[in-house]
Amino acid sequence: EYFIRAGQVGTVFPWGDSFAPEGCKYVNGQRTGPNDPGTPCTNDAYGYQLLPVGSLGANAFRLHDTLGNAAEFSSSCGRSAPGADGDCAHRVVKGGSGNDGISGLRASPIWSWTPNHINPTIGFRIVREL
């Protein structure tokens, strides 16, 4: 969550409590549904496909694609998120994908899956210390 939020605490999104208009600078996500309005952004010419890395703005840590685009498996254990119960047979998934609306585009953990779960909207982030 720390790298997604880029040091911001106490808000729903890294840029504040309201998704738009600021979120449209950073997020590829658009699906709508009866309980999710989807994103109000019009900057996604790719539909539900992944955007090329770095297509949208970087967060305050200069990291791209930390919300939306592809959700990311984390090393956190937990059967149900939030409040992971320590079940390491399941891993927390964060960040939401380009297939998610506003409710799925958050830094806090909202899903967990087994590590062998296959889903084209979930990936992982490789980190290299500088």
Image (spheres, helix red, strand yellow):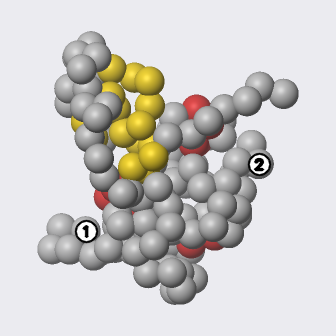
The correct choice, above or below, for 22 with respect to 74 in the image is below
Residue found farthest to the left: 34
Dots 1, 2 in contact, CB < 8 A = no
Closer to the observer: label 1 or label 2?
Answer: 2
Drawn side of residue 25 relative to residue 81, left or right: right
Q: Note whether residue 112 is visible.
A: no
Of 14 and 100, the residue lying toward us = 100
Q: Residue at x 50, y 40 (%)?
A: 124
Above or below, 10 relative to 57: above
- The residue carrying mark 2 is 62
What's the distance in space between the residues labelled 1 and 2, CA to CA? 29 Å
Give, as a three-letter code, the residue at label 2: Arg
Instruction: Classify residue 99 as left or right of residue 32.
Output: right
Category of crowding for the residue at label 2, using alpha-carbon neighbours closer than 10 angstroms: few (below 14), some (14–19), many (at least 20) = few
Residue drawn at (20%, 30%), measured in percent from left and top? Answer: 80
Q: Is 47 or 1 nearer to us in this picture? A: 47
Q: Examine the rendered structure and indicate whether residue 79 appears above or below residue 67.
A: above
The circle on residue 36 is: 1
Q: Tell me which residue sits at (54%, 64%) in the image.
A: 27
Residue displayed at 38% across by 57% down: 121
Q: Position of residue 85 (x, y in %)?
A: 23, 17
Residue placed most toward the observer, 31 or 39: 31
Indicate the secondary structure of the residue bearing disc 1: loop
